[in-house]
Amino acid sequence: MRQSGAMPSLHVGSSASLLAISLLTAAAVVTAAPSATAATVPSPASSFTVPGVLSAVAAAPSGDAWAVGSTSGKTLIVRWNGTDWKQVPSPTPGTSPELSSVAVVSARSAWAVGGYGVYPHAKTLIEHWNGTDWKQVPSPSPGTSPDLTGVAATSEANAWAVGSDGSRTLIEHWNGKAWKQVASPSLAGSAVLTKVAAVSARNAWAVGTLFTTSKTLILHWNGKKWERVASPAPAGGASLSGLTALSAKNAWAVGTTGDCGCGAGASVILHWNGKRWRRMASPGSATGAWLFSVTATSARNAWAAGFSGCGCESGSFHPLIVRWNGTAWKKVPSPNPASGGTIDGIAAASAASAWAVGASDGKTLTERWNGSSWK
């Protein structure tokens, strides 16, 4: 397992599920897609099961989707072709390589990020889909424990990746030719960024946690530099692990308060209205509810996902999916494996199509929204 400021995802059935942690970083960032009608679409077989975990998913309006993670000590990338999920060969450098986030630019361009190696020789990992193959692309690896956990892109010449180098935030930018490290705001104490979302070349967000004070951390890119923006700080501390942005006046961030290992985790949902970040009421905000990922296609259609329940026994954690209908967040029924499970990434292409991925009992988990229910 790589060593970094961001702890590994919590997955039922793995050794990581026994850890009491204050931050989970498996979530997907998906660029906004045009809304569609809520008509029910056919629900093909959507199951993909291999040993390991799917940490993130990205969906395109065309119906194409990518999911990334790790399996048996190797990177894992799978593609939805409209009928089923198929594993696609992906670079697997060094030791313990993992992919934590994926973003789609077009049918011929997508990015996946993560890391490999162990302290003090860990390295960032960035891979690119060129329409035919996934190729590793050189990326800055500052310090002894760099790791990338979020990626977003708006064009072939504008992509962002975020993460940490131990206790420091790490931001990298793709300018169409190379990935380069970009200065982060100076922060007092230990901090980590978990996810990034981009609206345009001049408007992007990144979220994470200030470990020293256990407070939410939100940064904004204004086209020239990254600056910290005020964000709600729930009592008892909180971390943010999911982010999506639709426009300059509409963005969502999700996470949790407290520490699930202590039985005190409660879900957190924040909304940007163009002027400030505000905490929203959320179902699953009772003890033992965490949200890892959020996605949106319109002002009236957004999804967030994670898990509910706390404990160390198999089956203690249950997938949690909630939906924004333009007025309120409400819990939506979803498949609940007998052995329990977590949803680490969620992505929507339209009101009638969305994907959720994660892990259950040491194996990958995939679920699909067909416009009326999760299957």
Image (cartoon, grey):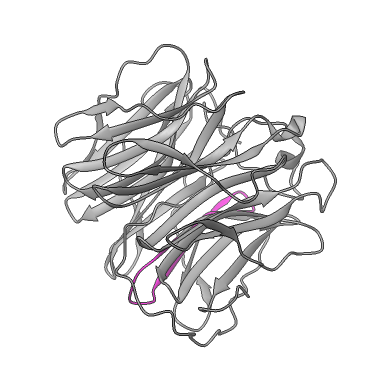
- Where residue 110 appears, x then y in whole percent? 32, 59
Outermost residue, bottom side: 42
Q: Quarter of the image containing the C terminus?
A: bottom right
- Where residue 210 appears, x then y in whole percent? 48, 22
Segment colored magenta: 58-75
Left/right of residue 340 with respect to residue 227 in the rendered view: right
In the image, residue 109 above or below residue 120: below
- Where residue 257 appears, x then y in whole percent? 60, 33
Is 74 inside the magenta-drawn segment? yes
Is 32 inside the magenta-drawn segment? no
Q: Which of the pair 331/142 is nearer the observer?
A: 331
Q: Quarter of the image containing the N terminus?
A: top right
Residue 146 visible in this rendered orientation of the protein: no
- Where residue 187 appears, x then y in whole percent? 37, 16
Residue drawn where x is 58% and y is 59% of the image: 330
Residue drawn where x is 68% and y is 30% of the image: 259
Outermost residue, top side: 188
Left/right of residue 216 with respect to residue 180 in the rendered view: right
Q: Which of the pair 43/276 is nearer the observer?
A: 276
Residue drawn where x is 48% and y is 69% of the image: 354
Residue 37 visible in this rendered orientation of the protein: yes
Q: Which of the pair 167/263 is nearer the observer?
A: 263
In the image, residue 237 above or below residue 355: above
Residue drawn where x is 65% and y is 39% of the image: 266
Classified by dominant secondary structure, the portion drawn in magenta counts as strand
Outermost residue, front side: 327
